[in-house]
Image (cartoon, grey):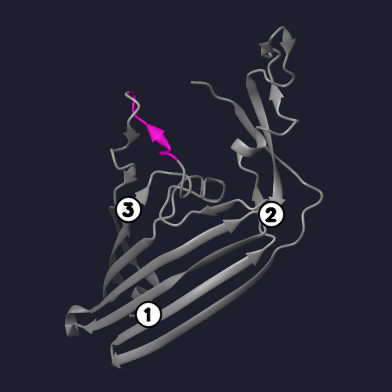
Amino acid sequence: ASSFGGSRVGNPNLQPEKSKGYTLGIVWDPLPNTGIAIDFWRIKRDNEINVTPYAEAAAFPDAIRSDNNLVIDGKVVPNSGTLLLVKAPFRNANYTQVSGVDVDIKQRFNLGEQGKLTAGLNWTHMSEWKRVENNGNVYNFAGTHGDCDASNCVGTPKDKVNFNLTWAKDSWSVTGLVNYRGEMKNITWEGQPCFNKLANGSPAPNADCTIKAFTTLDLSAKWDIRSEERR
C-alpha cells in the first residue's frame, strides 16, 4: 500500500454561496406539561464552497510526484511517478441539498417536595444529503461515513436520537443525556467501496461494511450558589 500527502489550497475564483430553506412544522401542547413539535425541513445551497476530493485532485497537473516515471516501450511517461503530494483547491459545487424531519417531545413532572422532573426526546431523521458538482458528479452522504471534507469522517447517520432527563430540587439539579447514533455504511458516499478493509482483504468492520448503531451516556450535576444566597 502507498500513501501521499494532501494540502488544501485557495481559489481566487470562488463565488459567494446562496441558500434557500423551507420548513413546515406544527407545535402541539396536548396537556399542560406536555409539548410536541414536528418540523420538516429542506435546505438548498447554491455555489457551496467545498474542497476538491483528493482522489480527483490527484489527476491535476500540479500534483507533486517522484521522478520515477514509468517507461513504456522505451519512452518515459511524464507525471507518472509515485504520487507524493496532492493540492486540493476549494471550489464551488453546483448545489448541496439536505432534507429531513425533527421531532421534539418534552414532558414536565411536579414531584412536590421532591422537586421537579423534566424529560425530553429529540429525534432527527436525515432523508437526504446530496451534493452535485459542476462536472455532473453526484455525492449522496446520508447514511454513510462521509462527508469527510465537512465532518472529518465522523459520519452522517440517517437517525440521531437524544433523550434527556433532569431532576431539580432547590439549588441542585442532575441531568442524564442518552445519545443514540444510527447505523452507517462504512463508505465515503453511496456507490463507493468499503472505506476500510481487514488484513485478509474483507470489508471492515464486518462483512456488511457497516458501522453499527451506538449509544453514549452523559451525566452532569449542577449546584446554583445564587439560589443558596437567596434563601
Image: 204 above or below 15: above
Are there few (<14), some (14-19), or many (20+) residues within 10 Å of tag 3?
Answer: many
Res. 183 mark: 3
User: 78 left or right of 149?
Assistant: right
Question: Looking at numbered disc 2 in the image, what kind of residue is underneath it?
Answer: Asn
Residue furthest to the front: 73
Q: Which residue is mark 1?
A: 230
In the figure, residue 160 lies in which quadrant? Answer: bottom left
In the figure, residue 89 lies in which quadrant? Answer: top right
Question: Looking at numbered disc 1 in the image, what kind of residue is underneath it?
Answer: Arg
Are the residues flagged by discs 3 and 2 in contact, CB closer than 8 Å? Answer: no
In terms of depth relative to the viewer, which is nearer, 214 or 99?
Answer: 99
| Residue at the image point whose x is 32% and y is 56% from the top | 182
Q: Which residue is mark 2?
A: 134
Q: How far is the residue under mark 2 from the one under mark 1?
A: 62 Å
For marks 3 and 1, the one nearer the N-term is 3
In the figure, residue 180 lies in which quadrant? Answer: bottom left
Are there few (<14), some (14-19), or many (20+) residues within 10 Å of tag 2?
Answer: few
Residue furthest to the right: 12
Query: Which secondary structure, mark 2?
Result: loop
| Residue at the image point whose x is 56% and y is 64% from the top | 97
Location of the C terminus by quadrant is bottom left
For marks 2 and 1, the one nearer the N-term is 2
Residue 153 in the image: x percent, y percent?
Answer: 47, 45
Res. 176 mark: none
Q: Magenta part of the protein: which range?
A: 193-199
Chief secondary structure of the magenta span? loop
| Residue at the image point whose x is 40% and y is 39% from the top | 194
In terms of depth relative to the viewer, which is nearer, 102 or 170?
Answer: 102
| Residue 46 counted in the magenta span | no
